[in-house]
Amino acid sequence: MPAPALRLSLRRLLICSMAGVALHAGLAAAAADTAGIDDAAASADVSFTIQEVAAGVFVHLGRQLALDAPGHDDIANIGFILGQRCVAVIDTGGSVRIGRALHAAIRRRTRLPICYVINTHVHVDHLLGNAAFVAERPRFVGHSALAAAIARSRDFFLQHYAADLDQPPSATQIIAPDTAVQQTLQLDLGGRHLQLRAWPLAHTDCDLTVFDDRSGTLWTGDLLFRDRLPALDGSASGWLTVIDELARLQVVRAVPGHGPVSTDLPAALDPERRYLRALIDGVRGELAQGGSMQDAIAHVAAAEMPNWLLWDSTHARNVARVYEQMEWE
């Protein structure tokens, strides 16, 4: 078993476990093809591009960068959905700056009120932009465990991501949900309904998906990574169970937490499933042979490395998490 100092170091490494109104004329304008349109972001060094992946469904694809790289505040897929009555935002990015860029993109397309800001989980790259929407007075919506997860992470966010908040940074800028999803929740945008579902322990302990019934679009949050190596803060075995259930859903397209939009959800989930299975089987094998955590980090799932971006910044942490969980089974 790992020495106490090593166990403490690894635990530190694992921290951070983030009608009456007709369809606005802007919906016709907003429903026009907007793929490839650049919106000015809140600072000159950000090019903020929005794609309309289905009528009224807009996605900004995050960059494939590590969390400690310049531009790390713009790595998550975020976006919004237009209804006849109002707008729902789905994740807001990793800084107030990115949140403002998203807000500006919405206002270029519609003057409808922003009634919901939905966060798919606790990770910093998906929710630090929430503060940019406070003046709109929306309902902030998340998994029933999200508020507690944010409370646990708030000091960590302030310590490590203070530059991504307005200055001076403050805890009040890290916005928790005021509307909790226990299991499922339906939101009405006017002529368009969103089905929200809270999932058991998987990528994190507070994963939420959003399904737009009008377009058949599922926003998976980080339950689906594409190209970028999945980051594990929950349970690998729990995540595999959720993947199997997601693969059975009938959807037209899926917006992952990271990577390109997919029109074949089961196929998009396959690489992630394969990697997580390799993690579990590899760690189990190392433990059976009395291998140390360092041995597991060096060898487990090594064949998967060519298939993923950002391997070096994520894989060791994933192995450590699985090893620590499985060594007490």
Image (cartoon, rainbow, N blue to C red):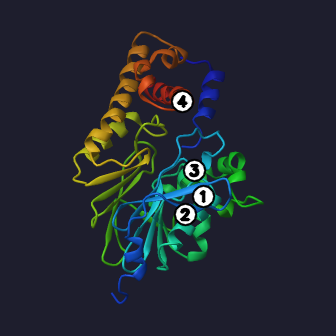
Left or right: residue 74 versus residue 116 is right
Residue with the mark numbered 1 = 98
The Cα–Cα distance between marks 2 and 1, rounded to whole angstroms, is 6 Å
- SS state under label 4: helix
Residue with the mark numbered 2 = 102
Q: Earlier in the sequence, mark 3 or mark 2?
A: 3
* Total count of labels: 4
Q: Position of residue 227 (x, y in %)?
A: 43, 36
- Residue type marked 3: Asp
- Residue type marked 4: Arg
The Cα–Cα distance between marks 1 and 4, rounded to whole angstroms, is 27 Å
Q: Earlier in the sequence, mark 4 or mark 2?
A: 2
Point out the frontmost of discs 4 and 2.
Answer: 2
Location of residue 251 (image quadrant): bottom left
Left or right: residue 170 versus residue 50 is right
Q: Residue at x 61, y 33 (%)?
A: 13
- SS state under label 2: helix
